[in-house]
Image (cartoon, rainbow, N blue to C red):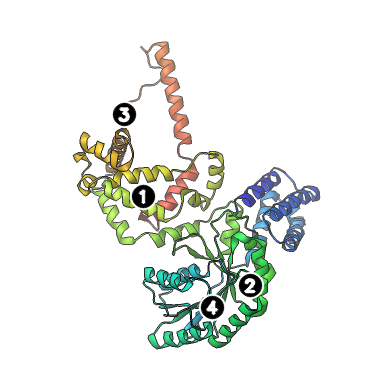
């Protein structure tokens, strides 16, 4: 979401770091660029004005101007002020009460129903709670059916409301039923409108009065930009919301809503939706988002993703197979699917410090998602015996696999060849033997012709160049963080 803003700020800070000493003139010039970058990102103009003024006051201090690294200090000041702009620190949900009542409000289409299901799953997984979903939107066609279907998929209980019931009666009866049946969190999915009207607000106020929720979360679509901020302020005025949930944070919007809503409403962003899956809901961490905006990555979020989506027992079992050289194509497919669970590779790269620059240098080069999909299709076309014992795959079987996966026999053969080489390499690595040493022939060895010497020297130079550029430190960080967490082997 913040890609364009990140690129603009990166250009500004690169210029600042280029100055050996800072002056009032180059600080003013840099802040003018920062202001334009924020305005282009659809941040509220009053918020931009106050933000830039705070940065200017701190950046013009003598300690910064006389510092040996003034550019870095200005970046730190902007980072600190961004954290403050976004709310300072992560806010937790108020789950007090027996049962705790959470009321979701917002306009139609903002994602309340999906967010209710996502939040129920998060509460069950991370807080060990027993949530109870309440479909109280009797106006939108199939809204009740949608929440019941999501509840069924997640194996979470839902109140059996019907479109002919009154929303206030539904919510009151649901809270009483949750208390009777032992559910400790009630999630009220209320109705929305295409715009704010008095009828909607009166109904929401009545539900609030009847159920006394500990949390009233305003759900806003981050793609709507400043409109989301304006609507949030209106809902807050009538309902006194306790927090904000921003959905579609994985979209290509400019991010102005996220940077403005905290300052305009005075209410913290508590949760963000980062995808369409029911597991794609995260706690909003201002410091992590500020680091992402400034291209500093977000290692903690990446590790949390790995720990959530990777089963410790599976990881240990995979390590045992690797040590015994029993890694098969079936295991390889499982590992690919595990990586896909973490999100797109491009999204993961943004969470790693330094990798945003590497991604920018790659330019239009596509990430290997399509290649992974093709490889998985080939493996899916194999029988279980073939996946576990690739040596069984004869020429006729390769032709069958190619037809089944929509690829060619050459591509199937190449996959099998690459997998065989990978197996041999892992056997050496896991056995602690390392790669076998090969005798080296120096370029200037006596008896070699001039052409042979030139060819050997060129080959050595290319090898040194490829070795230097094939695995920059950023890629090593990517491997270490994504595929290893807390010492557990997640990927060969």
Among the 4 quarters of the image, the one containing residue 413: top left
Q: Which residue is mark 3?
A: 438
Q: Which label number is shown at residue 336? A: 1
Q: Is residue 299 left or right of residue 195?
A: left
Q: Quadrant of residue 49?
A: bottom right
State the separation of the CA atoms marked 2 and 4: 15 Å
Mark 3 element type: loop
What residue is shown at x 43% (from left), y 72% (from top)? 145
Sequence-wise, which precedes: disc 1 or disc 2? 2
Marks 2 & 4, CB-CB < 8 Å contact: no
Q: Earlier in the sequence, mark 2 or mark 4?
A: 4
Q: Earlier in the sequence, mark 1 or mark 4?
A: 4
Q: Secondary structure at mark 1?
A: helix
* Label 2: few (<14), some (14–19) or many (≥20) C-alpha neighbours in 10 Å: many
Could you tell me which residue is drawn at 43 percent across and 52 percent down? 482
Q: Is residue 299 above or below residue 187?
A: above
Alpha carbons under labels 3 and 4: distance apart: 68 Å
Image position, residue 307 (x, y; %): 40, 61
Pick whichever of labels 3 and 2 is earlier in the sequence: 2
On the image, numbered disc 2 is attached to which residue? 267
Asked whether the viewer can see residue 417, the reply is yes
Position of residue 79 measured from the top left corner of the image (x, y, whole percent): 64, 58
Query: Which callout, 3 or 1, points at the residue further toward the start of the chain?
Result: 1
Image quadrant where one finds the N terminus: bottom right
Q: Are marks 3 and 2 in contact (CB under 8 Å)?
A: no
Q: Position of residue 290 (x, y in %)?
A: 60, 58
Please give the residue where the numbered disc 4 appears in the rendered image: 103
The one of 252 and 325 positioned closer to us in this rendering: 252
Q: Secondary structure at mark 2?
A: loop
The residue mark sitting in front, 2 or 4, is 4
């Amino acid at each position: 979401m913040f890609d364009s803003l990140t690129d603009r700020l990166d250009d500004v800070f690169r210029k600042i770091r280029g100055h050996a000493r800072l002056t009032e003139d180059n600080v003013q010039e840099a802040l003018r660029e920062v202001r334009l970058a924020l305005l282009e990102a659809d941040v509220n103009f009053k918020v931009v004005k106050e933000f830039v003024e705070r940065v200017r006051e701190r950046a013009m201090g003598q300690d910064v101007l006389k510092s040996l690294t003034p550019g870095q200090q200005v970046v730190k000041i902007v980072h600190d002020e961004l954290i403050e702009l976004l709310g300072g620190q992560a806010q937790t949900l108020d789950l007090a009460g027996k049962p705790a009542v959470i009321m979701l409000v917002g306009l139609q289409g903002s994602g309340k129903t999906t967010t209710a299901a996502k939040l129920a799953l998060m509460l069950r997984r991370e807080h060990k709670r027993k949530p109870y979903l309440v479909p109280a939107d009797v106006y939108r066609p199939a809204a009740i059916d949608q929440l019941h279907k999501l509840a069924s998929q997640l194996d979470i209980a839902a109140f059996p409301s019907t479109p002919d019931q009154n929303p206030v009666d539904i919510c009151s009866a649901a809270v009483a039923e949750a208390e009777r049946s032992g559910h400790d969190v009630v999630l009220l999915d209320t109705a929305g409108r295409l715009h704010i009207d008095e009828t909607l607000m009166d109904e929401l106020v009545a539900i609030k009065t009847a159920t006394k929720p500990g949390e009233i979360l305003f759900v806003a679509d981050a793609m709507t930009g400043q409109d989301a901020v304006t609507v949030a302020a209106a809902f807050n005025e009538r309902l006194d919301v306790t927090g904000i949930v921003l959905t579609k944070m994985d979209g290509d919007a400019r991010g102005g809503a996220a940077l403005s809503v905290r300052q305009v409403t005075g209410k913290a962003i508590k949760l963000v939706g980062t995808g369409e899956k029911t597991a794609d809901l995260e706690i909003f961490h201002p410091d992590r988002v500020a680091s992402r905006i400034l291209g500093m990555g977000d290692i903690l979020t990446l590790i949390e993703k790995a720990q959530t989506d990777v089963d410790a027992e599976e990881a240990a079992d995979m390590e045992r197979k690797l040590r015994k050289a029993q890694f098969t194509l079936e295991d390889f497919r499982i590992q690919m699917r595990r990586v896909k669970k973490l999100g797109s590779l491009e999204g993961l790269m943004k969470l790693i410090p330094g990798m945003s620059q590497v991604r920018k240098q790659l330019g239009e080069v596509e990430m290997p998602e399509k290649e992974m999909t093709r490889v998985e299709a080939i493996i899916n076309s194999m029988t279980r015996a073939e996946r576990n014992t690739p040596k069984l795959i004869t020429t006729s079987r390769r032709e069958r696999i190619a037809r089944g996966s929509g690829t060619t026999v050459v591509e199937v053969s190449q996959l099998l060849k690459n997998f065989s080489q990978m197996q041999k390499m892992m056997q050496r690595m896991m056995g602690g033997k390392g790669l076998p040493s090969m005798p080296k022939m120096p370029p200037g060895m006596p008896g070699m012709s001039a052409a042979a010497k030139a060819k050997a020297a060129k080959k050595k130079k290319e090898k040194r160049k490829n070795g230097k550029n094939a695995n920059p430190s950023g890629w090593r960080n990517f491997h270490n963080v994504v595929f290893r967490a807390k010492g557990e082997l997640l990927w060969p």
